[in-house]
């Protein structure tokens, strides 16, 4: 029996944070000085799937008016410098100075950009590195790869003063192009909406000539795109307000662009909790998106919360770390940090996996994640543990998860703590799954609920589960050492699991160790 528990890590992979190369990335500070915002992020924890230890932005609007004057917005300069000074001071306090600091379109295009960089250096001691458009595209695309290593398609990053496109596939970034299609620059186009539409169309046709014309998936990066996605959620009545990995069809995207044009922007802003500064750019960004989608004709549109800042972190990783699964790494880190018995999640997965032998690999991956997270919320009050685990799974900053997979993971964890989901405040979210997946998530949860009672101190396998679906027979063979664990409550949970599986017969036996 112990052979099962002592197998190599296999699908789990050895924990990333055990690797010295990962520990060097345990806390990394990044400063992004964009045309519209200045943001500092401090990544902490499992490097392959970063946790946001600190995340703050100031809408400085450095690039406002740049198209007319050729210079940075004077008020924006003051606000940006104040924000940078604050962020550098925080970095020094955290012991992570100097920050990895980059500036994008506004600073690189403005005639006083170098002057601003000199001022930043003089007042804060921080070297602000200006990157060109193609480098910006590459870093944004790397940010997408941080969340989805297998991602293929076209990444589109829109900032205040520029818009970049980059190909991704096979874990690498391909061709990149840049343009001046940022909303702050579009404001300066003379001739009104008609002239602006022609300008947008001409620029995108030029970009299309330099890059492949067709992609199955379009990844949207940038605050203006995320605001449009939030409006799409509002229009559709979509229940899960997590923008990362939110998906839109081309038809839905076009309908939302029309929706933006027809509705009062201030009312829409309040309904969707979008800042005034961001909302002012949404109509212009939606004009760009309409033409972009029309020309590139993707089959699907996905929103990424990961971009240039995450791309900078990705840049620091050796390839063997990049190849890790971001979801499993994040869950392993959470287990190590918060579970009462770190390491048991792997044993639990081995124990319940026979119930899901015919599941697709992508589904087994989510079941692995559930097993790793099954005990991380033990500090929550018992009456609310099921809801806390569901909420954590569906809203946490996890990479490599579709929205439907988030709900499947959350529902599995809900049933880890509760037999029934009746009366759940999250019932509306369950409609993101089909009935078969809802049922399977319940089985996963009840299997974990039973398996969690079968812990042996040395992480040995407690026994073997065997499920014969054609005969509808569930069998449990307990290791001799684990037999005392199979008490009254464990029996009730075993029976609950059998009922969820639709088992018509069950058997329990003890594997006697040979002398």
Image (spheres, rainbow, N blue to C red):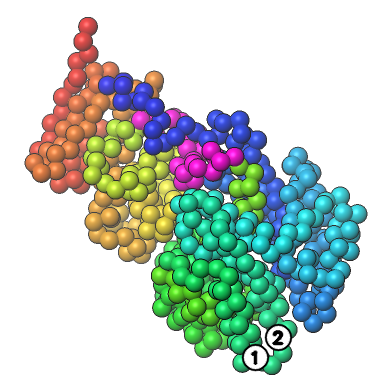
Q: Nearer the viewer, residue 49 or 148?
A: 148
Region in magenta: 318-347
* Image location (x, y in percent) of residue 461: 31, 25
Quarter that holds the N terminus: top left
Task: Tell which circle, 1 or 2, labels the residue nearer the N-terminal end.
Answer: 2
Residue hosting label 2 = 189
Neighbours of disc 1 within 10 Å: few (<14), some (14-19), many (20+) = few
Residue 90 belongs to the span the image colors magenta: no
* Image location (x, y in percent) of residue 347: 35, 30
Residue hosting label 1 = 195
Describe the element under mark 2 as helix, strand or loop. Answer: loop
For image coordinates 21% across by 10% down, the residue present is 514
Q: Is residue 28 visible in the rendered structure shown here?
A: yes
Quarter of image, res 5:
top left
* Image location (x, y in percent) of residue 268: 55, 80
- The answer to whether 405 is drawn above or below residue 28 in the figure is below
For image coordinates 70% across by 77% down, the residue present is 184
């Amino acid at each position: 029996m112990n052979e099962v528990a002592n197998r190599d890590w296999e699908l789990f992979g050895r924990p990333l944070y055990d690797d010295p190369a990962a520990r060097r990335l345990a806390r990394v500070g990044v400063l992004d000085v964009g045309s519209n915002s200045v943001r500092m992020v401090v990544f902490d924890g499992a490097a392959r799937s970063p946790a946001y230890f600190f995340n703050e932005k100031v809408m400085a609007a450095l690039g406002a008016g740049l198209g007319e004057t050729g210079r940075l917005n004077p008020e924006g300069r003051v606000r940006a410098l104040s924000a940078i000074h604050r962020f550098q001071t925080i970095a020094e306090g955290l012991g992570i100075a100097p920050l990895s600091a980059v500036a994008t379109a506004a600073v690189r295009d403005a005639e006083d950009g170098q002057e601003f960089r000199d001022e930043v250096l003089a007042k804060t001691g921080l070297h602000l590195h200006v990157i060109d458009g193609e480098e910006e595209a590459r870093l944004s695309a790397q940010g997408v790869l941080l969340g989805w290593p297998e991602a293929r398609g076209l990444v589109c990053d829109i900032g205040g003063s520029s818009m970049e496109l980059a190909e991704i596939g096979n874990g690498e970034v391909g061709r990149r192009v840049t343009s001046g299609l940022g909303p702050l620059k579009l404001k300066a186009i003379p001739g009104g909406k008609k002239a602006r539409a022609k300008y947008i169309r001409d620029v995108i046709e030029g970009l299309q000539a330099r890059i492949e014309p067709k992609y199955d998936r379009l990844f949207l990066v940038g605050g203006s795109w995320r605001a449009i996605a939030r409006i799409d959620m509002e229009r559709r009545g979509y229940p899960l307000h997590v923008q990362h990995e939110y998906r839109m069809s081309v038809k839905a995207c076009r309908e939302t662009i029309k929706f933006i044009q027809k509705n009062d922007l201030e009312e829409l802003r309040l309904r969707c909790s979008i800042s005034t500064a961001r909302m002012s750019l949404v109509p212009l960004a939606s004009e760009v998106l309409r033409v972009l989608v029309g020309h590139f004709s993707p089959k699907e549109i996905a929103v990424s919360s990961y971009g240039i800042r995450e791309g900078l972190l990705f840049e620091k990783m050796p390839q063997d770390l990049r190849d890790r699964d971001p979801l499993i790494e994040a869950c392993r880190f959470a287990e190590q940090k918060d579970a009462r018995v770190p390491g048991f999640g792997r044993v639990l997965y081995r124990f319940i996996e026979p119930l899901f032998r015919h599941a697709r690999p992508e589904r087994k991956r989510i079941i692995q994640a559930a097993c790793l997270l099954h005990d991380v919320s033990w500090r929550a009050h018992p009456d609310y543990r099921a809801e806390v685990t569901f909420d954590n799974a569906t809203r946490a900053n996890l990479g490599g998860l579709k929205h439907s997979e988030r709900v499947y993971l959350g529902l599995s964890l809900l049933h880890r703590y509760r037999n029934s989901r009746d009366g759940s405040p999250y019932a509306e979210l369950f409609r993101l799954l089909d009935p078969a997946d809802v049922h399977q998530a319940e089985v996963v949860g009840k299997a974990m609920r039973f398996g969690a009672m079968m812990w042996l101190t040395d992480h040995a396998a407690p026994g073997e589960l065997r499920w014969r679906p054609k005969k509808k027979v569930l069998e449990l063979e307990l290791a001799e050492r684990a037999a005392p664990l199979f008490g009254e409550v464990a029996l009730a949970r075993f029976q609950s699991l059998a009922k969820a599986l639709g088992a018509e017969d069950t058997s329990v036996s003890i594997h006697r160790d040979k002398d």
